[in-house]
Image (tube, rainbow, N blue to C red):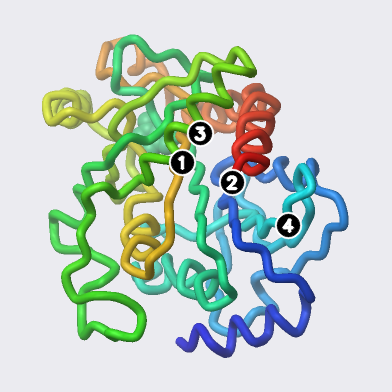
Amino acid sequence: MSHTSASDFIRSQILHSPRIAVVTGSGLGALGDALTDVQSVPFASIPDFPRATVEGHRGELCFGVLRAKPVYIMRGRVHFYEGYSLQQVTFYVRVLRALGVETLVLTNAAGGLNADFAAGDIMLIADHINLVGMAGHNPLHGPNDAALGPRFPSMNPAYDPHLRAVAKQVAQALQINLREGVYAAVAGPSFETAAELRALRLLGGDAVGMSTASECIVAVHSGMKVLGLSLITNLATGEPASERFTADELHHEVLAASEAAVPKMVKLISGVVEQI
Ligand code: HPA
C-alpha cells in the first residue's frame, strides 16, 4: 500500500489542495450535497483504496467548497469489521495527510451510553477509550516510519481543544444542544450485550461506536488536528427496551435517526469549517 501513489492519483484528478477534510459516517454522506464546485473520485479508482461494503456508506472522495472554504469530503469509509486491517481502514488518513490536510473532522454514528442522551443528539468527542487498541489492534502496530510520525505518539489530548471550543461556540450560536463526552470504540459488527453496555458506561463511555478511534490515532500520529462528532442514532443503555430490536431494525434505526439529524449536523460542520 503506497499512500504516495494514491495521493498522486488524487492530485491528478482534483486540482485543489484543501487543508480540511471531513469524513462522513453512516447516513451522513448528504453533507456532500452542501458543497459547491464538486469534483469526486470514486474510491474504486484510487490506487490501494479499500472499498466500502456497508449500506449507507458511499465510496467516494469529493472536493468541494463549503462556506467559501475548500474541503475534501470522504463519503464513506471502511471498518475493521468488514475484514480490512486497521492499516487499510486508516490508509485514507495517510493519503489526506500526504495531500496537505491539516485538520480532520471525523463523524460517526454511535449508540448513546449516557442516559441523558436521546437519539438524534450530536456528541462532541472530548476523548476516546479505544477498546480495540487496548485489546491489541492498534493501527500503528508494526515498524514505525519516522518520516510519518513518532514511535510513541502522545494521545493526550487526542481531540484538539481549540477545535472543540470552536464547535461549542458554533453550536451555541446555532442553538444546537451539543452534547460532549467520551467515545468508546469497539470492533463490532455485533452490537453490544447489555452487560457490555453496562461495562462501557462504568469505564466512562458516553457513546459507543465501531470507527473513529483508529483514524484519530493515525491522524494524531501524522500531526493532524482532529475534531470528532458522534451522531447518537440509538440509545445503547442496556435497558430492556433495546431488546425489542432485531439486528435489522437496529441498523434501520441507525440510518433513520441519522437522516433526521443530518440538517443539524450539516449546519454544525459548515459553521465549524467556516471558523477554521
Ligand atoms: N453500538 C455500536 N456502534 C453503533 C451503535 C451501537 O449501539 N449505534 C451506531 N453505531
Q: Position of residue 11 (x, y in %)?
A: 70, 81
Q: Amino acid type of disc 2?
A: Ile
Q: CA distance from mark 3 to mark 1?
A: 5 Å
Q: Quadrant of the N terminus?
A: bottom left
Check contact, mark 3 vs mark 1: CB within 8 A: yes
Query: Which of the marked residues, 1 or 4, is nearer the chain's N terminus?
Result: 4
Q: CA distance from mark 2 to mark 4?
A: 11 Å
Mark 4 and mark 1 in contact (Cβ < 8 Å)?
Answer: no
Mark 2 near mark 1, Cβ–Cβ under 8 Å?
yes
Q: Position of residue 262 (x, y in %)?
A: 66, 29
Classify mark 1 as within 8 Å of ligand 1 or not, answering yes or no.
no
Label 1 belongs to which residue?
163
* Residue that mark 4 sits on: 70
Residue at 28%, 11% (x, y): give it: 240
Which of the two labelled residues, at mark 3 and mark 4, occupies the earlier sequence position? 4
Give the image quadrant in which the ligand numbered 1 is located.
top left
Label 3 sits on residue: 166
Describe residue 271's horizontal placement relative to residue 207 as left or right: right
Type of amino acid at the residue the image marks with label 4: Pro
The image shows residue 29, relative to residue 100, as above or below, that is above
Residue at the disc numbered 2: 276
Classify mark 2: helix, strand or loop: loop
